[in-house]
Image (spheres, grey):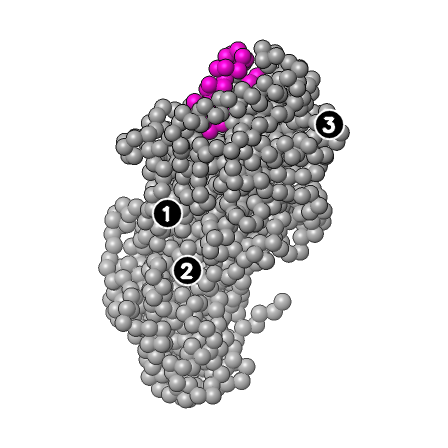
Amino acid sequence: MSSRGIKDRVAIIGMGCTRFGEHWDMGFDDLLVAAADETFRSAGVTRQDVDAYWLGTAQSGMSGIALARPLGLEGKPVTRVENYCATGSEALRQAAYAVASGAYDIAMAIGAEKVKDGGYQGLNAFPVPGDGTTRSVTAAAMFSMVAPAYAGKYGVPLADMKTALARVAFKNHYNGARNPRAQFRKEMSVDKLCRMPAVAGGLSVFDCAGVADGAAAAIVVRAQDAHRYTAKPLLVKALSLVAGNGSGLGDPAYDYTTFPEVVASAADAYAQAGVKSPRDELAMAEVHDCFTPTEIVLAEDLGLAERGTAWKEVMAGTFDLDGEVPVNPDGGLKAFGHPVGASGLRMMFEAWLQLRGEAPPERRISTYGKRSLALTHTLGGYPGEMVSFVSILGTA
Amino acid sequence: MRGISGWGVHLPYPRLDKSLIKAVAGSGGGVGTRTVASYDEDTTTMGAEAGRAALRARAVRLGSLWFATTEPAYADRTNATVLHAVLRLDRTVPAYDVVGSVRSALGALRAACQGSGNALVVASDTRTGLPGGPDEAAGGDAAAALLIGDGSDGGPVLAEIVAWESVTDEFVDRWRTPGAAASRLWEERFGEARYTELGAEALKLALATAGIAADAVDHLIVAGLHDRAVAAVQRTSGVPAGRITDRLAAKIGNPGAAQPGLLLAAALESAAPDQYVVLLSLADGADAVVLRTTQALASYQPYRPVAAQVTAGGPVSYGRYLHWRGMLPVEPPRRPEPARVSSPAAHRNAQWKYGFAAGLDVPGGTVHLPPAPQDEARTPVADAIGTIVTFTVDRLSYSLSPPVVFAVVDFDGGGRLPVELTDLEAGEVAIGGRVEMTFRRLATSDGIHNYFWKARLLRGQEPPGSGRSEDA
């Protein structure tokens, strides 16, 4: 098996991202138009200049028409992609590969989700007709099993574990409070977070990602063309996607303290990008903190902390804005909100801002100017059965 | 001679303390408890559990399956086919419903007794009355399965049928139009008079046919929904009071169509070889059955005896009981209702969905739940015992009785399944807990019931020989 990647062959030359939140006054089309227009302006191109489009949406629209209609595209190849919560990342991956192949000169990846029109809280997947035997618990419940498993394996007292989870939420709320595009802009103290009632396992609502409407987009070109559009392009260093086969759910050896799909996609991405020591090389990481224990496990699966130590690193502030490797400086899924199809591109938007020095001072990462690589990570599914995407982006 | 060659019963875990009723309903209730089918049980699932118990005590090749109830989960289509699939019976084994009345149960039993081969006769009932009414307090929910054979290839007969006499009479004592929530009753004295006379008549005929006197009866079981008539028939039967089988009314209530089979099982569990057991059922006439226990009874081990199940149960509040029965609509969960089950998908996967047969990767010996597409063989796991590896309590997902308790279960002999638990309070679940599988109704959408399996705590009742067998 080979995974050569497209290191330094494709660059992002423009990005846009709506505010995430409860957009009662905006429909799916409005969100797409808002993100696309900002992105066209950012890149200095028109919708007609873009040769091909990839629309990522998990369940807000079907087919490329869902984008072609609101943007008024004529005669353009538009593809709708879906890969659970990695949907937005997948759109960028397809667009980047299309440009790298030489098939197109300029492509847009756009991700959006309109979840607040559904009438129910939380995310609800399209029901596929089935035999009725698949489990029906929430994602929160599935991920809640990670915390006690992790605590048990590494001998973390449950009270300390709870505090570490709250510390993850505290950090992401702190960052989100400094981000005008984030859904939740209020800081939350660790004490207050620890007192929230449990809704799934030991997790409270504040351990869960915000459910939001939103859209984000990127325009990509071949790297050698990037300087025609911007002095500060964001180079694609690595794009990796791994779809698990679901065997973890039925495997007695699986212990809910790691996500093998994430480990595999991270290894692939680091190999593509030539990253040897992520903790020493990455300026920042945007990771899929769908639930607070997920972020702790991800820190280890992505190689940002040794096994069994991420909870301590969280407590020590390693992943804070001013820490060694800032994680989720934009507030993450937790505070920025999680419109499924948009989240992967939203993460890249933060890398776009931070690495290019455009993040506001109150949210600027400690590594700015010293390191030039950012990691984004999205996962979709559950422990034991997930897709995982990792990108490495860089300015140098 | 043809007779009973085994049995299995199912008493649901939830128990309603009848003293709780009056404070809410303003009347009714009383002392003692009644069994309550859980929110995820119906007559079909309870019948399947009773059938499983019968076949676990005595694994025989069935020639026919009969299912009787007053409360079928479906009309128009057969419910016995669900049991057929759960019990993994051969397609050539016929399965029939005999539904609608309490008397159906005796009709099914009689048909099986008059047939040939091994027959499994399952009677299952849920008894509902309007809040505060007599049927609510007197009723109970249960299922009983009787295995009928002639000793040739189904193991020895444990109680031979010596005589069966039946009298039939048309009179309206209780009635319920289809779809009505509860039955209605004529004034009590009329039914009491009819049933007292009919019971005595049937008993006299059957004892005459058997050639025995009333005082030769070692165990007299009188079943029937008319409590005063039952008591009167017991009193005037000529059988000494000490030989009359306890109807378990104060513990489980009267489970209607399941009562004759359940009480017969209870009587046989306390009977000795070479005794006369008489089952008298008062329902739209009377059926009197005289049985003679055999020597083989002494060595028969029922899977989970009635007495053990009577004492194994946990409380359910009256409010929750009313909700489960549809008598108290409560705020629904703010989650989408489950999608209806695809009939073709369910049929394709029937071995998994109903039979709980895992996939077996033959060269590697790995057990897959659910089966993986490349698995060469199926292996039944329904009787396997499992251990809780980890768990969670989900207060967010759709459930008729939240919260959902969900666990990752590793089965003895291989295989892991993340699965919902039932028959427990959230605080009872723990890592390392031992569980068994139980057949339940997960939900109903568009009128289609979604049946599948859940796990429930063994609570120390680890059955002997809970292993698996392989079949290709």
Please report the residue visible at 61 percent of the width from the left and 69 percent of the height from the top. A2
Above/below status of A224 relative to B471: below
Q: Position of residue B334 (x, y in %)?
A: 35, 54
| Apparent side of residue B291 relative to residue A230 in the rendered image (left or right) | right
| Apparent side of residue A180 relative to residue B29 in the rendered image (left or right) | left
State if disc 2 and disc 1 touch (CB < 8 Å): no
Disc 3 designates what residue? B151
Chain ID, mark 3: B
The magenta span reads B218-243
Disc 1 designates what residue? B395
Camera-near label (1 vs 3) is 3
Residue neighbourhood size for the residue with mark 1, other residues' Cα within 10 Å, grouped as few (<14), some (14–19), many (≥20): many
- The quarter of the rendered structure image containing the N terminus of chain A is bottom right
User: Marks 1/2: CA distance?
Assistant: 16 Å
Please report the residue visible at 23 percent of the width from the left and 59 percent of the height from the top. A186
Disc 2 designates what residue? A124
Q: Which mark is residue A20?
A: none
| Apparent side of residue A93 relative to residue B19 in the rendered image (left or right) | right
State if disc 3 and disc 1 touch (CB < 8 Å): no
State if disc 2 and disc 3 touch (CB < 8 Å): no
Do marks 3 and 2 share a subunit? Answer: no
Do marks 1 and 3 share a subunit? Answer: yes
Query: Residue type at mark 3?
Result: Gly
Do marks 1 and 2 share a subunit? Answer: no
Q: Position of residue B109 (x, y in %)?
A: 62, 32
Q: Is residue B240 visible?
A: yes
Give whichever of B218, B310 is nearer the camera.
B218
Residue neighbourhood size for the residue with mark 2, other residues' Cα within 10 Å, grouped as few (<14), some (14–19), many (≥20): few
- The quarter of the rendered structure image containing the C terminus of chain A is bottom left
Query: Residue type at mark 2?
Result: Asn
User: Marks 1/3: CA distance?
Assistant: 52 Å
Q: Is residue A347 visible?
A: no
